[in-house]
Image (spheres, helix red, strand yellow):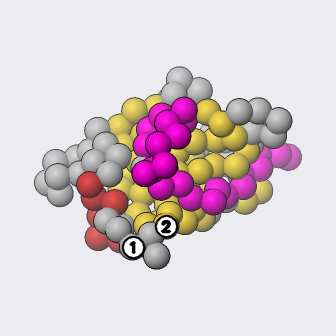
Amino acid sequence: QVQLAESGGGLVQPGGSLRLSCAASGFSLVYYKIGWFRQAPGKEREGGSCIGSSDGISSSSTSYADSVKGRFTISRDNAKNTVYLQMNSLKPEDTGVYYCATTCDYRDYDPRNFWGQGTQVTVSS
């Protein structure tokens, strides 16, 4: 079965850290760019972080929304078929459901894209 599965969410205090994982099954993530997106309560889904496809040799390109730049780091482990999102210095406004997908555009509704079910991140004291 082809799917993406996020994990690693939870409740954390402001200033804390979390590492989210996006694990693929049924296909190889190596050939795909992967995006992490956030959907806050009552708001539309928005983009956050993106990592390019891998050639297995050089590092994949990355890009970040201004709101997370310098605090979040996206990376991939091809051997584990997993993409990670390291989130540091978390703020209450980072709260939301985090999704990973085989696209870096949150407005890309191409049915050929794969999306995970999401993992909840809550930043609160």
Residue positioned 82% across, 35% down in the render: 42
Q: Which one is nearer the viewer's eye here, 30 or 113? A: 113
Q: Residue 35 in the image: x percent, y percent?
A: 46, 44
The numbered dot on residue 3 is: 2
Q: Position of residue 80 (x, y in %)?
A: 35, 71
Helix, strand or loop for the magenta stretch, by majority: loop
Tell me the residue at 73%/45% (across/down). Answer: 96
The correct choice, above or below, for 10 with respect to 40 in the image is below
Which residue, as the protein is rendered here, is positioned at the far top?
A: 66
The amino acid type found where label 2 is placed reads Gln
CA distance separating discs 1 and 2: 7 Å
- Horizontal relation, residue 18 to residue 73: left or right: right
How many C-alpha atoms fall within 10 Å of the one at disc 1: few (<14), some, or many (≥20)? Answer: few
Q: Foreground residue, 20 or 54?
A: 54
Would you say 70 lies left or right of 79 here?
A: right
Q: Residue furthest front?
A: 111
Secondary element under disc 1, as helix, strand or loop, is: loop
Q: Is residue 84 a member of the stretch shown in magenta?
A: no
Q: Which mark is residue 95?
A: none
Q: Element type at marker 2?
A: strand
According to the picture, the residue beneath numbered tag 1 turns out to be 26
CB within 8 Å, label 1 to label 2 = yes
- Position of residue 113 measured from the top left corner of the image (x, y, whole percent): 45, 50
Q: Nearer the viewer, residue 86 or 29?
A: 29
What residue span does the magenta drawing correspond to? 103-125
Mark yes or no: residue 125 visible.
yes
Above or below 93: residue 82: below
Q: Residue at x 63, y 60 (%)?
A: 117
User: Residue drawn at (63%, 49%), measured in percent from left and top?
Assistant: 98
